Every structure is written in structure tokens, then in C-alpha cells.
Image: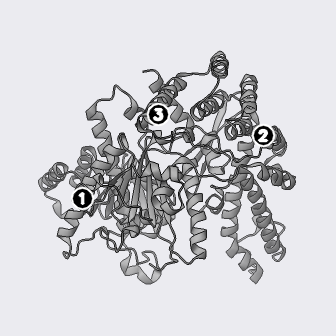
Amino acid sequence: MSLMENPQTLRECQIQKLKKMLHLNVGTDVNLVSSSNQEELTWKVLILDRRSSGIVSSVLRVNDLLEYGVTMHTLIDQRRAALPDVPAIYFLQPTAENIAQTIADIENDQYDDFYVNFTSSLSRSLLEDFAKKVAQTGKSYKIKQVYDQYLDFIVTEPNLFSLDMKNVYSEFNDPNTTEDQITSKADQIVSGLFSAILTMGSIPIIRCNRGGPAELISQRLDQRLRDHVINTRQNKGTGAESTSTASSSSHDKLVLVLLDRNVDISSMLAHSWIYQCMVSDVFKLERNTIEIKLSGDDDQSTVRRYDIDPHDFFWNENASLPFPDAVEHVEAELSKYTQEAKEITSKTGYSSIKDIDPTDKTNTQHIQEAIKALPELTQRKNIIDMHMSVLTELIKELDAKNLDSYFEIEQNFNDLRTQKQFLELIKKQSKGDNSRDKLRTYLIIYLKCDDLPKSFCDQCEKTLGDLGVDLAPLKYIKKVKELNKMSAMNTGKSLQTNGTNRNLSSNGGDLLSGLSSKLMGLTTEGSSKITEGFGSLISGIKNLLPEKANMPITNIVESIVMPANANQESINLTDDYLYFDPNATRGTHSRPPKRYSYNEAMVFVVGGGNYLEYSNLQDWCNSLNNSLGAAGSRQKLVTYGSTHICSVNEFLDECAELGKH
């Protein structure tokens, strides 16, 4: 890799492995649908289960599957017509149920040849059972391949992944959870992380905070990786594909930063103005699908779903930008499209690009050019329209719930005047139900302020209680804060849970208030209104947004990846983190680690992650790469993952469950 060459993202690595699997595990350098490669063309069907379907659909579309000769894909538990002359690729979780169904398909001659792939490692007992039952069918010749693919994780952004394991935080923090349940859950997490690491292609150094689930998982993952390294070294020279282990120097290796969710609770509750974060917060964003509930005139709600394609140019460029920037940019994209469409159609004689007839007998050069440009222009327009609709609905929700006011207060939580404003705010009634927004902001103030007046807390909690807000999450948060205080006193360290950001200008709060109603006026007469008159307003709004500042997890990552750039407080914190090197001799985690800089990092949070932390990490990494690029140095790559990328409401539900104990 050259100094300036960008390292591959996790999504690129996963796609590469999936395409190789679809090419029958023999490489991906042949275009299977090219007319010049007809002899290479092998049409096949793809059999999935619910889990593997989520893995594939997050990164590949139907056209991608067609490119590799997959003419049909279906779920293994659905009724399927027999295609005895067609080969089939199976991509499934390694479960007894899936193996039993695969055996039944072989026995019934459902397909011609069987290429069996598992999302993660097939246990020895299941493998032996599989082999025994295949032999009993007398049709073992139909099995052409059996592969462990190690792809058991969901990738929804270039550097974002999830193990899709919900409620891990509440399970690990519930005193009623048994040791066996914790061990089982930890092993499941280890398996998912092992898959992500092998897909990235490098065995990492592991750093983790002490005394919680992250330490348990690090220990078990270290052992799993050590066994893999030993097996890889033993198989070296046999021609078997292996994962890179040794590196020329320590800083060339991947570093895995494993953290417990409790290192920073407040980020799970915060309001944000980042486009992607707002979509996840206000609506439902899961596996690249935005789900919006719309209320009708008859009080009946309907659900509108928008699919985010991996090639969605607007999302890729604007998801991590502040919401006002996204609105400004969608306006620019619409103007650009309108201008291009006008220029093309003016040459054809048609009044609109929608009216162009591909079968037009005149077939002039201009019409040919227009027909050629039509698919790309249509796709762009569909994407622009989708984001116009999403942004319009966001503005409506922002207005109905006064979300800007809660965002503003969270930026100035330590200010006594702000606390007084918050007390007045939570008493006000809004057009939409924002009871949980009130609770979230109070929880953040409670977590981040060490010296809140008791009278303020009593008034807030009484007001919230009178409004019918479930205060069970607060009960649990109080326990967390108390435990953190005790831990800080015992170790002599300052609290790290409560990251702060006071970069909003002192008069920013007054200027931000009422923003919702100004924005709302732009959407009352259809989606086109979102783009009218916004230029002057957006410039004012952008000046009021807080400057970007590192969140607690980003500070932790910086102190491990680039210690020379980190503040002393973060360095002191991470110097105490455990250290594992699966490539080195046993017991290395007991030695104080040297401070290296690393080019690649994988950050994994046990107990739930969010888009806000992902966005903040990518902002930090991009800023660092801009300075490194100017110096001609190699680019950094940071991948963020968690047991589950969850919404604020999901996390509040977990805290509420814990608050009942």
C-alpha cells in the first residue's frame, strides 16, 4: 500500500468477501454477465435465512446479485419450487435447524449442486452431524463446498457495523442475570467480533477498560485470536487462505478499542443536529431503511419507508453534516438537476424530460443523448425527492416537539440561567408528545453536573412526574452516577463518564429559540417549499451551531491511536486500560503498554452504540487525515461498531427495565 492510498473500509471488505462467495469462492475478477465471458457464466440461486438476509441486503442490491449470476434469492424457511438443474449457494447461520433443512433439500433434489456457506464458524459437533446425515442420503456428491465465511455482522455505513444484538446493556447490568447467561452472551459477541476482525484482514492489539463486560470479552477474544494465529502459522505454506498476523512494526497493526457502554451514558441520550443522527432519533433508522409514521386527518397513522441505497450520493455526502447543511445541499442538488434536465430537454423538442419517448422514430442525436442520460437523471431525482420528503418531515417534528430548545439546553447545561429556562420549558405544552425529550435532557443535566441544587432536581422530577413521564430510567441513572462517584474516589481519578461541550456562544441560546417555527413555515405548502427563502436563514443558523468537539469515546480513541495529540487526562485514563496482543507471548496484558500510534482502529462498544459517536469519530479521523495528507503521511481508518446501534428510546427502555430492580 502506498503512503497516500486509502485503506479499505469494513463495508468494502465485506462486499469483497460476499462477492467471492457468490462467485463460488474462486475470486471476483471475472465479469459473469459479460457477453465475452459466456463460458464462465453460471446461473444460480441464493438461499438465505433471516440473519444472512440482513447481512447481504445491507450492502448488496438485486443488480449486484445479478452481476454474479444470482437470478433468484429466497429464504430457507419459505416454500420454494424445486430447480433440480440449477446450482444453489446456501448462506446461513450454523444452526441445527438450518442444517436439517439443507439436508432435506439435498435428499429431495431441490437443486443440482450445493455450495454451503455459514455466517460464522460451524461447531465440530454440528459439522460431524452434517457429514453423517449427508452420507445417509447417498447424495454427498451434490455438496461441492462447505465454507465458514466469518461474515456474521451487519454493515450499514462504510465504517459502521453492528452485531444486531439487542438489550445487551440491560442483560449485562441486571443483577438477576446468571453467570451462564453472561458467558453465553459474551461468547456470542466474541464470535461476531472475530468475524469482523477476520474480514478486516489483520489481527489487532486489544485495549479495553477494566472491570466490566469489555474486559471479559477481551480475554475471550484474545484466546480465540491466539488459537487462530497458532493454526494459521501451522497451516502456513499449505496454500490455505489466512489472515495477516505479523506486521513490520506495531503501529502498522490494527488496534481494537473495546469499551463498556458506561464509559459514556450521556451520548446515548443527547439530541443532535447531525442529519443521520436526527433521522435515527426522530424516526426509525434500521438496516438502511428510514421508517416514518405519518398521522392522517382521521387520526389513522400510516408508515412510509425509504430505502437508503449504498450508492445514495446525497446520504453519503450529507449524513454526517449538520441538519441545516443537508437542507441547503438538497436545495442545491434540486437546482442542479432542474438545470441539467432543462438543458437536455430543450435540445430534443420535448417540454419535459418525463415526456421523452425512447421509441421516438426521429431518433435524433439529441434524443439519443437524452435517452442515454435519462436513467442517471431519474435516479438522482428519486434520491433528491426522497431526502426532500425526509427533511420536510424532520422540520415538522422539530417544530411540533421544540427539539431545538432541548438541543440548546444540552449545550449549556452548566449555566444556572439555562437550568432555569429548562424548568420553564418542561412545564410548557407542545404540539407533539415530547415527554421523553424532556426526560432525556434532564438525565443529561443530572449526569454531567456534580453540584446540581436539590431544589432544582426536586422541581424537575415533580414536574416530569406530574406530566406522566416514566421516571424508571432516572432511578437507574442515579445508581450509575453514584457508582461512578465511588469508583472515582477509590481510584483517585476524575469522572470520565460525563463528556462536556461548552462551545455554543453565550448568546446562542436566545438566537436558536424559535428556530422550529421559522423552519416550519417553509414546509406548509408542499415539499418544494423547503427550498424557498432558506438561503438567508440557513447562514444564520449555521453560525449558531456549536463547534465540533471530541466526545468522550473519541478522546479515548485519540489517546490510544494518536497519543501525541491527546490531552493528559485521556492519556492517564487509557494508560490504565488492559493490553492484549494475540501475536505475542501470553500474559502481555499484565505489562504496561508502550504508547504507539496506529494507522487503523476498530472501536467496539458493548451495550449499544449510536450514530452520534460514529459521526464524531469519523469527523475526528477526517480532520486528522486532512492534516496527514498535507504532510504526505498514510491515512488513518477508524471503524465503529457495537452490539446494537440503538435509538434513544430503545436505550431508555433498557434503563427503565434496570430501574425497576
Image height of 30 relative to 425, above or below: below
Give me the residue at 24% from left, 54% from top: 587
Secondary structure at numbered mark 2 = helix
What amino acid type is highlighted by mark number 3? Answer: Asn
Residue 509's tag is 2
Q: Nearer the viewer, mark 2 or mark 1?
A: 2
Q: How many marks?
A: 3
- Which residue in the protein does label 3 denote? 484
Q: Is residue 152 visible?
A: no
What amino acid type is highlighted by mark number 1? Answer: Arg
Report the front residue among 211 and 269.
211
Instruction: Answer with left or right where residue 52 lies relative to residue 545.
Output: left
Residue 175 in the image, given as x and y percentages of width and height: 36, 26
Secondary structure at numbered mark 1 = helix
Residue 294's tag is none
- Which residue in the protein does label 1 denote? 226
Secondary structure at numbered mark 3 = helix
Spatial separation of the CA atoms under disc 2 and disc 1: 53 Å
Q: Earlier in the sequence, mark 3 or mark 1?
A: 1
Q: Nearer the viewer, mark 3 or mark 1?
A: 3
- The part of the image, by quadrant, that contains residue 272 is top right
Q: Nearer the viewer, mark 2 or mark 3?
A: 3
Spatial separation of the CA atoms under disc 2 and disc 3: 30 Å
**Disc 3 residue crowd, few under 14, some 14–19, many 20+, Cα 10 Å:** some
Report the front residue among 439 and 526.
439
Residue 643 in the image, given as x and y percentages of width and height: 42, 45
Instruction: Answer with left or right where residue 375 lies relative to residue 544.
Output: left
What amino acid type is highlighted by mark number 2? Answer: Gly
